[in-house]
Image (tube, rainbow, N blue to C red):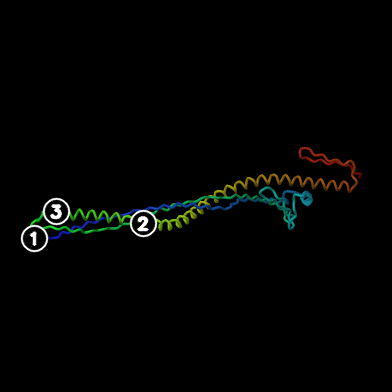
């Protein structure tokens, strides 16, 4: 029997664990937008001086008009009418507002892989004279099988640790992705709010212009009524002051007719 010889067989396993994390975040943004429209009419160029005086007198007596710092203010739905005696200007303004709220969203997806390698080396004995059938080939086969089995066992045990490492990687990236996704969601909400605000502002300006036309028409009718009331009051005062008799006031289809008799 010859001295035994040794043969070594190495087995290697490369193992890996993939990880993936997805973070979805939403954010809301809100604001208020306004649309305005204004119009100025000069009553001095529209009315003769006596009629303008009659109109101003009627405003002073009308409870719907409030004297504020020398100007007469009349509030209307969604707006304000101001008459300025100093200039004779009638200013009408309408302001419409609306609340705007939008939702932004963002998604962050990250993935990766952790890898490792395990290795083992197993030994087999053989004899040059092939004592008891211990050939080199047989020794290599036995050592190879042992190396493969042990490599599989080592890989399986290492895989558990590698899985934990992958989970930790995913957790860390998820934490980082959460902050980034929240920032992206807020930026998306701010962008959408700006876009929606511009759109709503244009719509409100158009609506305010239409509303202004309605208020202007109604206000001018009110100007006419106030003017007629002022003229009527002035005539009535004149008639009573001068002893008029048979004083009669008739109104039909918006026309006021005043009759009285005075001695010449």
Give the farthest residue toward the bottom. Answer: 3
Residue 138's disc number: 3
Residue drawn where x is 82% and y is 47% of the image? 233
Q: Dot 2: few (<14), some (14–19), or many (≥20) neighbours within 10 Å? A: few
Tell which circle, 1 or 3, labels the residue nearer the N-terminal end.
1
Whole-percent x and y of residue 44?
73, 51
Do residues under tags 1 and 3 come within 8 Å of each other at their CB atoms?
A: no
Q: Nearer the viewer, mark 1 or mark 3?
A: 1
Q: Residue furthest right?
A: 263
| Label 3 neighbour load within 10 Å: few <14, some 14-19, many 20+ | some
Badge number at residue 2: 1
First in sequence, mark 2 or 1: give its number: 1
Q: What element does badge 3 sit on?
A: helix
Q: Position of residue 24 (x, y in %)?
A: 45, 51
Provide the residue designation for mark 2.
164
Q: Where is residue 132 shown, x and y percent of the image? A: 10, 54
Nearest the eye: 36 or 140: 140
Q: Is residue 53 above or below residue 257?
A: below
């Amino acid at each position: 029997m010859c001295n035994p010889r040794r043969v070594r067989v190495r087995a290697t396993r490369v193992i890996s664990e993939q990880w993936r994390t997805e973070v979805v975040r939403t954010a809301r943004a809100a604001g208020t937008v306004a649309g305005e429209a204004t119009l100025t009419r000069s009553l001095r160029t529209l009315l003769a001086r006596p009629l303008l005086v009659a109109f101003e007198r009627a405003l002073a007596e009308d409870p719907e008009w409030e004297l504020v710092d020398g100007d007469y203010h009349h509030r209307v739905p969604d707006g304000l009418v101001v008459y300025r005696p100093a200039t004779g200007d009638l200013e009408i303004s309408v302001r419409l507002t609306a609340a705007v709220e939008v939702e932004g969203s963002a998604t962050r997806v990250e993935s990766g892989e952790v890898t490792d390698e395990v290795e083992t080396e197993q030994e087999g004995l053989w004899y040059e004279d092939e004592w008891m059938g211990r050939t080199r080939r047989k020794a290599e086969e036995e050592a190879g099988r042992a190396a493969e089995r042990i490599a599989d066992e080592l890989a399986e045990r290492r895989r558990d640790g590698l899985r934990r490492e992958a989970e930790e990687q995913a957790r860390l990236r998820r934490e980082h992705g959460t902050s980034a996704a929240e920032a992206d969601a807020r930026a998306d909400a701010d962008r959408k709010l700006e876009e929606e605000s511009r759109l709503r502002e244009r719509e409100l300006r158009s609506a305010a212009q239409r509303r202004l036309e309605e208020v202007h028409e109604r206000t001018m009718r009110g100007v006419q009524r106030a003017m007629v009331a002022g003229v009527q009051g002035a005539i009535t005062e004149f008639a009573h002051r001068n002893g008029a008799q048979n004083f009669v006031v008739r109104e039909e289809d918006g026309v006021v007719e005043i009759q009285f008799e005075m001695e010449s």
